[in-house]
Image (spheres, helix red, strand yellow):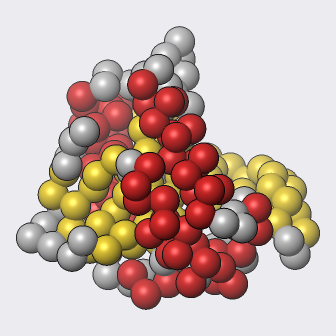
Amino acid sequence: MFTYPLDDHVELRPLAPEQARALYELIDDCRDWLRQWLPWVDSVKEVSDSTNFIKGALAQGAENGGLTAGIWVREELAGIISYHEIDWNNRSVGIGYWLGKPYQGQGLMSTACRVFTDHALMRMGLNRVEIRCATANRRSRAIPERLGYVLEGIVREAEKLPQGYVNHAVYGMIRSDWLRLR
């Protein structure tokens, strides 16, 4: 299990099953906020749903197919960042993320995404990292834009949320661009 400090009070750590209650409570406390952008929120109905998510993330990580980390602020879970399934043949991966509402606007996710991007491209030897965000989710879109990702296109009706289908902005970062930006 790794711990990666982002500053004196913030760190990335893999989730463990004993943290399922903290994960569930963060989701439940921010349910209305998260529901706007994340289709899975309403399927998290009890702590066991969070336990199952954590176990699945750990299994995927053990198979070298992804990585999920909690973002911890002063020992409180603030959100999640993860590599979606790694495509080792094409040397690419997508990053997904979310923060509880009280933790937004502090640069936490930009810093975490910078670390995950650098790790994927420089340490894991991948060539491409992709981030997809609902086009109307300005806060989420600001993160890849701030990090220098290229807006590569819009995928229409890419995701079904409770309010209906949303388009996704697709941002990409390739290793050669990252080397110039570092």
User: 37 or 168: nearer the eye?
Assistant: 37
Tell me the residue at 21%/76% (across/down).
Answer: 74
The spot of residue 46 in percent (x, y) is 66, 66
- Left or right: where 80 falls relative to 89: left
Decide: is 126 above or below 71: above
- Left or right: where 38 falls relative to 20: right
Residue 92 seen from this side: no
Decide: is 33 above or below 23: below
Residue 29 seen from this side: yes
Decide: is 144 above or below 73: above
Tell me the residue at 82%/66% (across/down).
Answer: 161
Q: Give the total of numbered labels.
A: 0
The spot of residue 4 in percent (x, y) is 19, 51
- Left or right: where 18 falls relative to 132: left
- Left or right: where 16 falls relative to 51: left
**Which quadrant is home to the N terminus?**
top left
User: 124 or 75: nearer the eye?
Assistant: 75
Tell me the residue at 54%/22% (across/down).
Answer: 87
Residue placed furthest toward the right: 164
Decide: is 177 above or below 7: above
Tell me the residue at 22%/42% (across/down).
Answer: 2
Residue placed furthest toward the top: 89
User: 52 or 161: nearer the eye?
Assistant: 52
The spot of residue 41 in percent (x, y) is 70, 67
Residue placed furthest toward the bottom: 102
The spot of residue 119 in percent (x, y) is 28, 37
